[in-house]
């Protein structure tokens, strides 16, 4: 399975094309759109989310609620485009229109792709860079991930996500999967603790008042993954490596860990490895899950636990110093609409990037011309694993 997205932040639409899904897979469009609504939410989001609806249409590959086996096209309209038709239109501008056009950007923002992207693609108007490098593109990726979650859900594989930390406020409670799945959607910051949610809201308010931004840590859990997804035989077939790469591809994400993660550095090996258990009912399990559901780059069947850190958004209402690429004079960086905190929304994006890699791994391992064929293969595999 592979996919591509296209579209700019203030262009007419975002488009995704997904290839490799089996035929006859049922698709719940309402459930998919609910995932996109989650991405729009979260305390600290900016004005843009009040403009966009993030509903989508299937342009190809779906008929009467089921996949055809052919490439699937998803389109999301940018409602804000109506205010940007001249600035972001595809037709050439007349000299008069070009003279009148405002919002040409020559002052790159520290922490963004603006300057390096401008140098790489020889863009003297840095809007050519920031429009595509904007996190608006993640709406298309969440749509792709939502389709992947439809596949996972139909195979009995469930996923959830939460926010573990924003700024110095941490939600360090030990929660069950059900508590995380239900509690995160009730919280404005996707934390489970109501007390920590209230503290975090105050922290975000303070950052917004100061024209600043704030980052955090998110967690994704995959429940009931099949044993043996991924492979140890080559570096580029390890599933944890693929997940890490996809997570780091999310805007502003700077680090990934599995299970105990970086705490492994300070923990003796005797307290780290997950001891193996067996029962005729459950098959092979682990006494603990310190390694986050992976051994040798392959899924063990235990829940996959991924955490990732998001830096504070670099677009600030108290902008940092930069340099005008035309005059080479120092200036305060350009201000674009932004969020003071997008960590809750980023947890949804992270969840869906993990979903994409999980779906890829499943479709790589099992035959899947039709969804019925895939279901049968997964069930046979489960029984084989139990009797190994």
Image: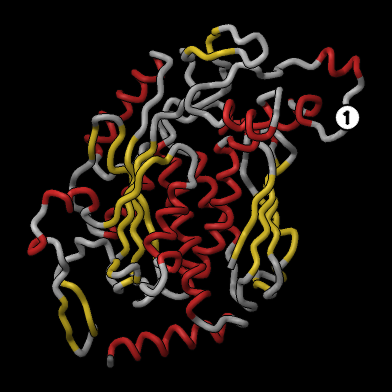
* Residue 348 in view: no
Image quarter for residue 122? top right
The residue under the point 88% across, 29% down is 92
Quadrant for the C terminus in the image: bottom left
In the picture of the structure, the residue carrying the numbered disc 1 is 92
The residue under the point 65% across, 67% down is 19
**Where is residue 248 shown, x and y percent of the image?**
44, 47
* Residue 263 in view: yes
Give the side of residue 278 with respect to residue 92, left or right.
left
The residue under the point 19% across, 44% down is 172
**Where is residue 240 shown, x and y percent of the image?**
37, 62
Is residue 306 depicted above or below 374 in this figure?
A: above
Circle 1 residues within 10 Å: few <14, some 14–19, many ≥20? few
SS for callout 1:
loop
**Where is residue 285 shown, x and y percent of the image?**
21, 77
Image quarter for residue 29? bottom right
The residue under the point 61% across, 82% down is 370
How many numbered discs sit on the rendered protein? 1
Q: Nearer the viewer, residue 195 or 320?
A: 320
Is residue 295 depicted above or below 204 in this figure?
A: below
Quadrant for the N terminus in the image: bottom right
**Where is residue 71 shown, x and y percent of the image?**
70, 67
Give the side of residue 129 with respect to residue 82, left or right.
left
The structure's colour scheme is: secondary structure
Is residue 227 depicted above or below 272 in this figure?
A: below
């Amino acid at each position: 399975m592979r996919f591509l997205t296209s579209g700019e932040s203030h262009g007419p639409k975002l488009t995704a094309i997904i290839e490799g899904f089996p035929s006859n897979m049922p698709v719940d469009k309402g459930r998919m759109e609910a995932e996109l609504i989650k991405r729009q939410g979260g305390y600290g989001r900016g004005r843009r989310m009040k403009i966009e609806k993030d509903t989508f249409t299937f342009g190809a590959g779906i008929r009467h609620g089921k996949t055809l086996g052919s490439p699937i096209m998803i389109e999301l309209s940018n409602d804000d485009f109506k205010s940007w038709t001249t600035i972001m239109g595809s037709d050439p501008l007349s000299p008069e229109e070009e003279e009148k056009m405002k919002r040409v950007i020559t002052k790159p923002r520290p922490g963004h792709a603006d300057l390096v992207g401008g140098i790489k693609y020889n863009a003297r108007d840095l809007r050519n860079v920031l429009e595509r490098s904007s996190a608006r593109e993640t709406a298309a990726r969440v749509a792709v991930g939502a389709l992947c979650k439809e596949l996972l859900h139909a195979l009995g594989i469930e996923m959830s996500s939460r926010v573990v930390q924003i700024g110095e406020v941490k939600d360090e409670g030990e929660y069950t999967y059900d508590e995380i799945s239900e509690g995160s959607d009730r919280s404005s910051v996707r934390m489970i603790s109501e007390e920590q949610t209230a503290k975090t809201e105050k922290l975000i308010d303070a950052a917004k008042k100061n024209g600043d931004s704030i980052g955090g840590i998110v967690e994704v859990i995959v429940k009931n993954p099949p044993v043996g997804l991924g492979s140890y035989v080559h570096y580029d077939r390890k599933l944890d490596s693929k997940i890490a790469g996809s997570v780091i591809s999310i805007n502003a994400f700077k680090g990934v860990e599995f299970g105990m993660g970086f705490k492994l550095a300070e923990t003796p090996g005797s307290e780290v490895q997950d001891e193996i258990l067996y029962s005729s009912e459950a098959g092979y399990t682990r006494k603990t899950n310190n390694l986050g559901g992976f051994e040798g780059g392959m899924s063990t069947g235990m829940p996959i636990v991924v955490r990732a850190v998001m830096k504070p958004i670099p677009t600030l209402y108290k902008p940092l110093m930069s340099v005008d690429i035309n005059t080479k004079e120092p200036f305060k960086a350009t201000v674009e609409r932004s969020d003071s905190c997008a960590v809750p929304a980023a947890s949804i994006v992270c969840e869906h990037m993990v979903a994409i890699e999980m779906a890829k791994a499943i479709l790589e391992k099992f035959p899947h011309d039709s969804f019925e064929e895939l279901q049968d293969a997964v069930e046979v595999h489960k029984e084989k694993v139990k009797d190994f």
